[in-house]
Image (tube, rainbow, N blue to C red):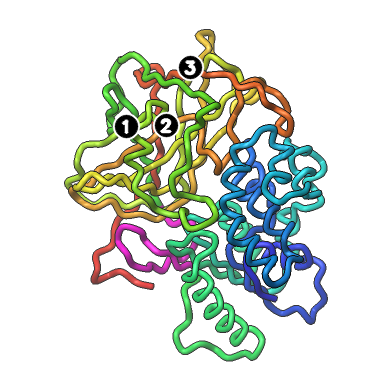
């Protein structure tokens, strides 16, 4: 079996109970568990979910009707994504309610028993056939697909992983996926040993613009904290005492998405300077690097925040600032905060851990690191209305006054998986 996205999910759905006639799987930009894609960081992945709902709603269109729908579709989607309540966004985008989309909105808790039946990650150790996985650094399914690789490897299964500089829908990943799938089947169905065996893991190092072979994922790395500081400083040294940084988040004008992990042509790496000029986006920037800084693996952040509301979001993005000033997004993540999800200290300050997308990136000398902190990435994730109303029906918009602490008692930081960079002579893959 072979296929990408939903067709990859269908492979996982049958893999654990498949008869012996099924000899190999080739899964691209997909995962065994969709929950983390649908309810990203405890929020709702509006862009991906509504785009899929609209696409399936018009799947039966034919001829001119389909062409017209395609031409109008993106504009209608963009208008629909600004609509509230969310339960009517499929109606605005597709002209009718889409059953599965309504069900996803109703089951907003990722731990809801509803999701157990569509979570195939629990049976990965039972998958006997060899599996090749392909993903991209800006793909929707990347974290879960990497977890699938680790689970299969831990179970002693035959598995291979390729991660390129791709978004979810890209010509590059489709072409490479087709080529690698055919090579995989040639080996495991026909028994033809490749003349040049591929590495167990092959990743594209962004910034270095080259492929590298790894023995496993993730490779050895040193978890290194870079601390937020006064005046928008980002440094590997612990912060000194300073007042918190502040911003105001208004869900009536939600902080927008610029590039990153979304569907459509605007996904991937983009210049973030216009986004960073907004008053609801904090930036923390390092000094100019005098040596290569290479990171490969999972990226995380631990921020000390205080909000005027008990319902809010924390969005964190790592960027590469070029010598000319362009700020290019590398990876990001979001975490929804609600009563019971985090325990405040006596001063009402929360420690919010945010898992950013894993990455493989080389920051070159003369560049700088930048960390963005905000409270949204709309429409990648549905705006947090701030009122605590149900996801499907919430319409009451409440403004949040946000504080990010960065002092000796509250050392907010981004944690980077720093690796030893290879020279061009010794690069492989």
Q: For the residues marked 2 and 1, what is the alpha-carbon distance in whole angstroms?
A: 8 Å
Q: Do the residues labelled 2 and 1 touch (CB within 8 Å)?
A: yes
Residue 258 location, x and y as percent? 43, 45
Q: Nearer the viewer, mark 3 or mark 2?
A: 3
**Image disc number at residue 373:** 2
* Residue at image coords 47%, 73%: 199
Q: In this view, does 230 lie to the left or right of 99?
A: left
Q: Label 1: how many residues lie within 10 Å, few (<14), some (14-19) or many (20+)?
A: some
Query: Do the CB atoms of the residues marked 3 and 2 lie less than 8 Å apart?
Result: no
Mark 2 burial class by Cα count in 10 Å: few <14, some 14-19, many 20+: many
| Alpha carbon separation for disc pair 3 and 2 | 13 Å
Q: Nearer the viewer, mark 3 or mark 1?
A: 3
Q: For the C terminus, give its image quadrant.
A: bottom left
Q: Which quadrant of the rendered structure holds the N terminus?
A: bottom right
Q: Is residue 418 above or below residue 281?
A: below
Is residue 210 a member of the stretch shown in magenta?
A: yes
Highlighted magenta segment, given as a residue range: 201-220
Q: Distance between the residues labelled 3 and 1?
A: 19 Å
- Above-or-below relation of 29 to 89: below
The residue identified by callout 1 is 284
Provide the residue designation for mark 3: 401
Q: Earlier in the sequence, mark 3 or mark 1?
A: 1
Q: How crowded is mark 3: few (under 14 residues within 10 Å), some or many (20 or more)?
A: some
The numbered mark, 2 or 1, whose residue comes first in the sequence reads: 1
């Amino acid at each position: 079996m072979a296929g990408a996205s939903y067709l990859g999910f269908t492979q996982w759905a049958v893999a654990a109970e498949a008869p012996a006639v099924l000899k190999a799987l080739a899964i691209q930009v997909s995962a065994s568990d969709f929950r983390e894609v649908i309810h990203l960081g405890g929020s709702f992945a509006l862009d991906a979910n509504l785009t899929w709902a609209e696409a399936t709603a018009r799947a039966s269109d034919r001829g001119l009707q389909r062409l017209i729908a395609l031409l109008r579709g993106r504009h209608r989607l963009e208008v629909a994504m600004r609509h509230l309540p969310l339960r009517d966004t499929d109606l605005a985008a597709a002209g009718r309610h889409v059953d599965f989309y309504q069900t996803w909105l109703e089951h907003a808790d990722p731990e809801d028993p509803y999701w157990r039946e569509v979570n195939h990650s629990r049976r990965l150790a039972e998958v006997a056939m060899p599996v090749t996985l392909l993903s991209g650094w800006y793909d929707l399914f990347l974290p879960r697909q990497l977890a699938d690789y680790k689970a299969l490897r831990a179970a002693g299964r035959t598995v291979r992983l390729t991660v390129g500089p791709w978004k979810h829908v890209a010509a590059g990943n489709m072409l490479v996926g087709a080529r690698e799938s055919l090579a995989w089947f040639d080996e495991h169905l026909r028994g033809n040993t490749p003349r040049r065996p591929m590495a167990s893991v092959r990743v594209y190092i962004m910034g270095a613009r080259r492929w590298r072979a790894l023995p496993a994922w993730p490779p050895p790395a040193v978890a290194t904290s870079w601390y937020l500081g006064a005046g928008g400083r980002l440094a590997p040294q612990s912060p000194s005492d300073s007042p918190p940084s502040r911003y105001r988040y208004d869900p009536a004008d939600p902080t927008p998405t610029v590039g990153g992990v979304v569907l459509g042509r605007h996904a991937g790496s983009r210049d973030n300077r216009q986004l960073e000029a907004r008053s609801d986006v904090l930036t923390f920037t390092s000094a100019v690097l005098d040596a290569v800084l290479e990171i490969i693996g999972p990226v995380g952040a631990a921020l000390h925040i205080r909000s005027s509301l008990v319902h809010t979001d924390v969005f964190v993005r790592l960027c590469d600032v070029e010598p000319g000033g362009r700020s290019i997004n590398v990876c990001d993540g979001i975490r929804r905060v609600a009563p019971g999800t985090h325990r405040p200290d006596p001063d009402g300050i929360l420690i919010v851990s945010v898992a950013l997308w894993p990455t493989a990136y080389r920051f070159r000398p003369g560049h700088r690191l930048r960390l963005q902190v905000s409270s949204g990435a709309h429409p990648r994730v549905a705006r947090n209305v701030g009122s605590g109303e149900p996801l499907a029906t919430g319409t009451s918009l409440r403004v949040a006054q946000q504080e990010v602490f960065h002092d000796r008692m509250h050392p907010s930081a981004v944690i980077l998986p720093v690796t030893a960079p290879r020279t061009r002579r010794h690069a492989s893959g």
